[in-house]
Image (tube, rainbow, N blue to C red):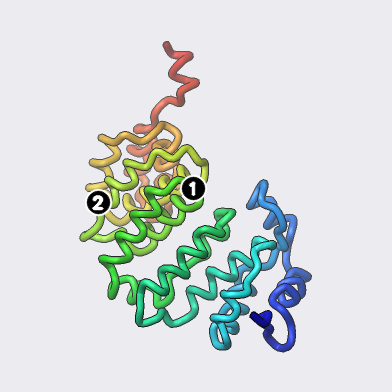
Amino acid sequence: MKTYTLDDLTIKEHLLELAEKGNKPFTESLNPGVEHVLGIRVPDLRRLAARIARTDWERFLETSDTFYMEERMLYGMVLGCIRPDEDLEVYLHRVTCFVWMINSWSVCDTFKFAGGQRFVDRHAGRLWEYLKQWMNADGEYEVRFGVVMSMSYFVDEAHLEELLACYDSIRHEGYYVKMAVAWALSVCFVKFPERTMEYLKNNSLDTFTYNKILQKIVESCRVDKDTKTLIRSMKRPSDKQRNVME
């Protein structure tokens, strides 16, 4: 298939131009160990994605490369700009192709469903099941995708109890999974403090994840001072501290 071009330039050529006004060292510092980072600013990538979505975006998706981290990000951003097909499964197949190419938290966390919350509400049942599948996957970024997306769209009255159970059941040892679970549960606490507090008092989370939740709650500007004091008192000793105490 003919390579996708925009303004007579390939996507790589567009990205290399945008990289000239980016910040590669800073972006690399946020994504340690990730290869082929250009350092393009996210707003610039989103603007490019929006332009692609107004053209032959299907050709872009079919011919897209994944050499640079930003190429992967752009793929996901374009999926967030297009109008989902009438066939939801066709759209989810494209999303699945994106999930398989995620190689950093930045690629993962910049994705949004096309149509936003309105689209999610219209297909809530299917999308909830779709995200639960990812939370039970094997890959670190696959699980993170499920956690971050469920946090973005399903922290509500109807899904809270099942959401807490899903997060509690995750046993993946990946750092970026644990951080995502901590982030998601801190959001649950902000939105549903009493019910999430009950969960925090009785859960099966590992110590690292549990303490990270508390840290994120304390760092939140949406939690009052007295609650933060209580949260600090709930911290568990680390495994190393526990061994010293014993």
Image mark for residue 139? 1
Image mark for residue 162? 2
Q: Position of residue 38 (x, y in %)?
A: 72, 63
Foreground of the two, 91 or 182: 91
Q: For numbered disc 1, what is the local secondary structure?
A: loop
For label 2, count other residues whose C-alpha is less than 10 Å away and answer few (under 14), some (14-19) or many (20+).
few
Q: Is residue 240 left or right of residue 13?
A: left
Q: For numbered disc 2, what is the local secondary structure?
A: helix
The kind of residue on which mark 1 rests is Gly
For label 1, count other residues whose C-alpha is less than 10 Å away and answer few (under 14), some (14-19) or many (20+).
some
Q: Residue at x 42, y 45 (%)?
A: 182
1 and 2 marks in contact (CB < 8 Å): no
**Of tags 1 and 2, which is closer to the observer?**
1
Q: Residue at x 41, y 49 (%)?
A: 137
**Sequence-earlier tag: 1 or 2:** 1
Q: Quadrant of the C terminus?
A: top left
Foreground of the two, 23 or 191: 23
